[in-house]
Each structure stands twice: as C-alpha cells, then as structure tokens.
Amino acid sequence: MAELPKRYDPNSVEPKWYRRWIDDGDFVVNSESSKAPFSIVMPPPNITGVLTLGHVLNNTIQDILCRRARMQGFEVLWLPGTDHAGIGTQTAVEKHLRRTENKTRHDLGREEFLRRVLEWQDKHGGIIIEQLKRLGCSCDWSRQRYTLDEDYARAVQRVFVDLYNKGLIYRGRRMINWDPSAQTALSDEEVVSKPQKGNLYFVRYEIVEEPGRFLEVATTRPETIMADTAMAFHPGDERYVSLLGKHAWRPLAREKIPIVADDAIDPEFGTGVLKVTPAHDALDFEIGQRHNLPIVDVLHADGRINCPAEPELDGLDRFEARKKTAEILQARGALAKAEPYENNIGFSDRSDVPIEPRISEQWFLRYPKTKDALAVVRDHLIRFFPVHWEKVYAQWLENIRDWCISRQVWWGHRIPAWYRKQKSEVRGQESEIYVGVEPPPDPENWVQDPDTLDTWFSSWLWAYQTMDEETRRKFYPTSVLVTAPDIIFFWVARMIIAGLEFKPGKSDRNENNIPFRHVYFTGLIRDKLGRKMSKSLGNSPDPLELIEKYGADGLRFGLMRIAPSGQDIRFDEKQIEEGRNFATKLWNVARFRQMHGASEASSTIDKQALSIYAVEVLARLNETIDAIDVAYREYQFNTVAQCLYDFVWSDYCDWFVETAKTEIFSEDEAKKKCTLAVMDFVLSAILRLLHPFMPHITEELWSLLRFGEDSIQFAAPPERLPLDGLDVPGIRRQVSALYDGVQVGRNLRAEAGIPSNAKSDFPIRPTIPGVEEQIPTLSRLLGAKTVETVQLEMPVGTMVGISKMGEIGIKVASRDRTAERARLDKEIAKLESEIQTIEEKLQNESFVDRAPAAVVDEHRKRLKDLTAQLAKLKQAREGLN
C-alpha cells in the first residue's frame, strides 16, 4: 500500500484523477444500459464566457447530484453544451472592432462580420468548458452540444416554420422594448426595472383657443416633447372637462395638438394631465390607437434625437438632450419648475442601458400550451425547489404577453423568412412572404429577413433537442434542472411550454413530455456586504485563482456550506479556506489510520467487542446518513455539507479518533483490531458520503487506503449499521456525560490560564457509574497528569466545574482564592437566573395548561438538574471559606 504523503497537494492530485476519469470513460453514458436513468442537461454557458462563482455554484450542485446518482446505481447522463449568446457575443466583437480598427459591423458587411465573429469564437470559445473540467465536472463530454450545431440549427428553423404554419408566429408593427446600445428589440423578460434618481419637469402648454391659459404637465422625459401628438386627461376630472375638443400648443417643434379624454389617465399623478407621445411610451401608444393619433418618432436607433425642427437638440444623445431641453424650455418660459424625483426605469438585461419603448415591425409568438404549463407545475408533475417559485411562475403564465422573438443582430439563427423583391426593395412595401426551412425555389427573386431569433428561442429546445432519439427514449424527461431564478421566465417556463407543444417524449401524455421532473433554483452569490458581484466593484474573485489556492474540492465544499436552499449567498473567502482546511483534516486522519497498518475494504464489526466510544460514533454515523438522505430529498445541499463537516471534524476526528488512541496504543491486540475495524468502517463511509462534494481527495484516499478496487464514484453509498443487541441509548447517555465532563475540564484549564500542553491533576466526583473504567481515556482527552475519583470533598486548591458526568476539578495550587470565588459567584448567578426563568414559566398556569405535556416535563426536569448543579456550586463556594 502506497504511503500517504505528509501534506495533501490538491494541485497534483486533482488533475491526475480527472485525466484518469476521462481516459477510463467514467462519465460516458450508455443509452442501452439496463440501469435506471438519471439525467441533467447543463444550462449552457455563453460560448465565449469564463467561469464565475455563479457557474461554480450551479455546476457543483449538478455534479453532486450526478455523482450521487452514479453511486446509487443509476445510468447517469450529464449533458453539457454552450450557447451562442447572440447579443452578448456580437456586442463583444463589435467593441473589439471599434477599439482596434475604429469600425462597425456595418463597415464590414454581414458576411465579413460573421467571419470575424467565428474567429473570435474560435479564439475565446470553449475556455469555460476547460475551466469546468478543472472544477471536476463529470459531464459526458462526448455529447457536448452547441446551439449553432448544424442539426440543432435545423431544428430551430423547423420549430419556427411549424409555429408560423399554426398561426402562432406572426409579424406585426407594435410597441416593443428597444436597446439603443445593442440596437435590437428585446422581450419583456429582458427588461430589468431599476430605481433611478432624476427630475420631474413641469412643462406649460398654452391653450390655442384660450391664449394666456396653460395646461401644466409633469414629465420625466422632456426630450420627447417633440413627439407629443395630444394632451389627455381623465374624463371624470372636472378641472379639465371644459377643454375637451380644444387644442394646445406643443412648446418644442411648435405645433397645435388636440386635447382628449381617456380613462387610462391617473388624475392623482402630477397635474392629472398627460402629454401623449405614442411613439415613445407603451401607454401613450394605446391611447394614441384609441384616438387615432399620429405617431411621431424623434429618436434614432442609437438613442440620439432625430428632430431637425429643433436644431439645438437634433443629433444629441437622449440624456444630453434631456438637460438641453430643460434649458430651452426655461428660456422660452415653458418650464414652470423641476423637482428631484425617483422612479423605476427599464434597463436592458443584455447591455445594462435604459431601454426605449419604440414602434417597430417585429416577429412575435403567441405562446401555446400555457394552461398545460400551469397545470404540470400546479399538479406537481414538475416540482420546484424552493416551492415558493411556483407562485412566481404561475403569476407570469397567467399574465403572459406575446413574445417578441426577432433581434436586429447578425450573429445567431437567421429567421427562415423571405420577402418577394419589389422594385423599391423597401421592407415596409413587401407584400409576399415565404417561410420555410429551405430557401424559396427561385431565391434570386427573394430577399431573406435580415434579423435573427432571440437566443432563448433556440435554448427553449435544449432539454430534448440536445439528444438523439435513442438517448431521448431513455433519458427524457430529464431528472433535474439546476438553474438561477432570474431565468425562470426566459428559460424554465419556455422549456416546459416547448416540451408540451412539440412532444418529444415516449407518448403524447404530458408526464412524458415535460422537460424535467424537478427544478432546483440556486441563490445569487453576493459579497460580504450583500452587494452583487461585479468587475467594477472588484468584489468578484476569479474561481481559477481560488482553485489554485485552495483546490477545487476546497472551493466546492466551502461554497456549498454557505449556500442555503434558494437564498442569496454571502461569499467570504474564509469559507473557502475552511473547505481547504477540512480537506487537510480528512487527509491527516486518513494518514493516522494508515500508520497503524493496512485498512480492510470490508471491515467486520464485532458488536459485542465495541468500546462505548465506537458505539457512539457508529450511532452518530447512522444519524448522519439519515439526515443526509432527508436533506438530499429537499435539495438542501448546505445541510448535507454541514452534517458531513460536523460529523467528520467533531464526532470522528476530535472525539472518536482521540478516544481510539487508548486502545490502539494498548497491549490488547483484540481491542486494537476492533477499534481499527471501526475506523475503517467509518472512514469508508465518510469518503463515500463526501465524494459528490469533494470528488478528487475522496478518490485519492479511497485508492491509497485500498477501500475498493474500482473508482469510488461507482461504490454504493453507506447504509445504516444495525446496532441491535446493544443498549445504544444507555451507552450514548454515558458517552455524552463523559464528553461533557471533558469539555468542562478543558474549560477550567483555559480559565486557569494553564497551557494545553501542561499536564494537570483532575479530581472527579462522578454522578454516573463506570467513570473509573474510563480514566485512561479521560486522561488522554484532558491531557492530564492524573485523573482520580473522590467520594467526599474536592482537594484544597481545586477549581470546580459541574458536568453531566459529575463534579470535575483541576488542581491549581497557586490559584488566588478570591479569583476562584469570583468565578464561582458568576456561575452561581448564571444558574440562579436560569432557574428563576423556568420557575416563572412553571408557575404560569396558562403555560402549563397550553404547552405540550412533553415540553412541561422537559422544563421540570431541567429545573431539577439545574437546582442540583446549583447546590454543588454553592458547596464548592463554601469550601473556599
């Protein structure tokens, strides 16, 4: 058996095992296997992305689930892939072009620009995949997919054509969300509302028919005044009813505009009068439709003002124009006042700039299967974890709006629609349209739509289109989806709709076509101050640097311990350091075991020969296995991690291994053999329980300790060991009392200021039987020179503490009796306060009558125990006089 090195080095161990797993094909799935299936499709990261802590969290959870399923005997498919990220990738390449060549994509033309994007993709694409491998992700990389794979792209086109032929996809001129930075339309889900501080401008519009009378309007966007085509008030607002049918002078690009009444106006906002700008506001557009108002667009696609009638504003950026407009209005006497104002503004989720409502001709999808999509979650064919996301999902589906699926970008799935060429070749005059997977028969007479599809339109097919038919038969629907809640609408809901509409499953039944059975929503990772992580704040650490510093296993385990189910995570690098320290602790305790001979792969436990400490650690192992099983069922990964941390660090290392040294170093070979067998049994279980979280170190120790001939990832999870024939409750009470006595003794040492490496005398007046037999172990745990039991008074010069084991003291010959009296007085006061609180509760008839009987009994027992402890402390206090 190879000897474990003194120091664990993750940077040599982790790459070694990952290469071996790949070389051995351990992650490659067999679609013809007779094993039950377990499958996950990876949420595809952007092709040019790099690893973030969010990716680490999401993919570690997926890996935990897949590795655990392999150990449980499932045939596991974890299908990886990447997304072409239309807007994101194109924006990155365009920025690079502007910086290096001072050119735009329009300077290059579509064909040359797409060639440049492909070059960019070849250079930067796939980096994140290699980084995921360094994290230890056990994906079947032979099945890696990409949203621009040829067969995947054909499937996207077929879906578009199918939905168009069903009348669900249509082309229309509507108010949409416009991103002036990326210069493309966005869906409603891609708009993020953010509070912004600005001004509320009160602008005066003179009544044409009543010179000298003005309507005052409150607006946050005076730069759009030139696009006003009406003034409006609520029909029930008596302040303005006499103005109905009259006109007002628009103060910029001066023109006469009508005054109308509309129920959509809020009489309480501002002055109760609205300037109606149909081209630049969704509500105004609806009002304009009802009153047949003209639509005047005064913004260029990039957000600059387009209004030659106002030369001072024409060509200005929209935010510069806002300030300039206020100055012009002020100079013309049309600005009554401006007040600070905070309101919510829609920002582009893609480029993080304020969006502009804009009238535009786009492609839209009427969502199919929305009622079925609601039902499969409501009826728990699909379960959400945490469950509260079900309500959020239902609210979106119940208020769903048509999806704007066209994007004015060149990188992506081009819309499979062609228009018959007209002499003018003006898009608005096209009359004939052809939609098909293949181009029209006479392509020279047609021009293809220049737009591409929203990236989410391709990724909503991800759960099944990434699989061939044979793979789908075994692994679809998938078992779990792990994703962030911020894409519950972008992706989760749409994948459910796609599965129900296109029916890729074994039959037409909904349960065979849902894309997944469980959805686990992770939390968002924030810094210690609760802020989102960003490069600009400098609070977003590089996961590769953390792996280099602490190891992939240290990063994985440390992060999972601070990841409460569905809640935001406060990241602290100290937690990752603790993950590394935990790996070191595990390594050292394995080395200790190896120092005492070869381990046994199948340890035989002689239950009748077990020490009381062995019974305790085996019982705690059983409890840990049960708690972990429950936590996995509810996707509480931090609970699993904390259970393992507590058991390994405290129950096994700090207590059992220390007690085991008494028998290991004794002359009794039978006891030594029994103790080592228990160590092997528990260590083997620990490694298997930890493997999904810390795959590399557990594989290394499994191999070096020779617990199994095959990889640990195919070893069955540990099961509870029946401890029948033993008085387990009685033994555990005894061990608990002994451990409590040791803890009290250690505290006394600390209070006395005695170094931990100095040997001391510990007299004990026990209140439980069997303490004499445990003196060798107690001596070791206390670091004692002597441990003696006394029947009467504690020796003079002894500090005394009360424990479940009884009174325990530490001899301090030079101890100042005044200081010891002060310490005991403090302990006595603390106990008296606790006793008073319990007595008041028990004297409260309402509490005694209403509280469960078990709770009342527990309070009475507690009172009895505390009273006994108090008497002993007072006795010790008297002994000092």
Image: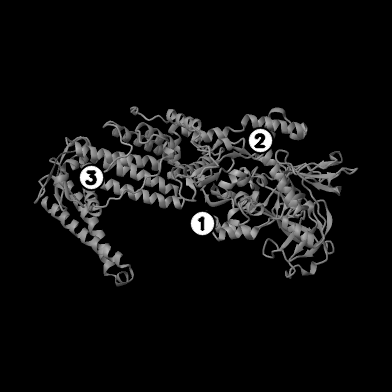
Tell me what residue is drawn at x 49 percent, y 43 percent: 66
Q: Earlier in the sequence, mark 1 or mark 3?
A: 1
Measured in 3D between alpha carbons, the distance from the residue under mark 3 to the one under mark 2, in whole angstroms, is: 65 Å
Give the vertical position of 163 relative to 93 (above or below): below
Q: Secondary structure at mark 1?
A: loop
Q: Secondary structure at mark 3?
A: loop
Q: Earlier in the sequence, mark 2 or mark 1?
A: 2
Residue mark closest to the camera, 1 vs 3: 3
Residue mark closest to the camera, 2 vs 1: 1
Q: Earlier in the sequence, mark 3 or mark 2?
A: 2
Tell me what residue is drawn at x 54 percent, y 58 percent: 380
Measured in 3D between alpha carbons, the distance from the residue under mark 2 to the one under mark 1, in whole angstroms, is: 37 Å
Q: Left or right of 584: which side holds 302? A: right
- Amino acid residing under circle 3: Leu
Residue that badge 2 annotates: 92
> Do the residues under discs 2 and 1 have CB atoms within 8 angstroms?
no
Report whether residue 249 is seen.
yes
The residue sitting at the left extreme is 792
Q: Quadrant of residue 512?
A: bottom right
Give the vertical position of 477 relative to 413 (above or below): below
- Amino acid residing under circle 1: Val
Residue that badge 3 annotates: 610
- Amino acid residing under circle 2: Ala
Whole-percent x, y for residue 373 in the image:
61, 57
Residue that badge 1 annotates: 387
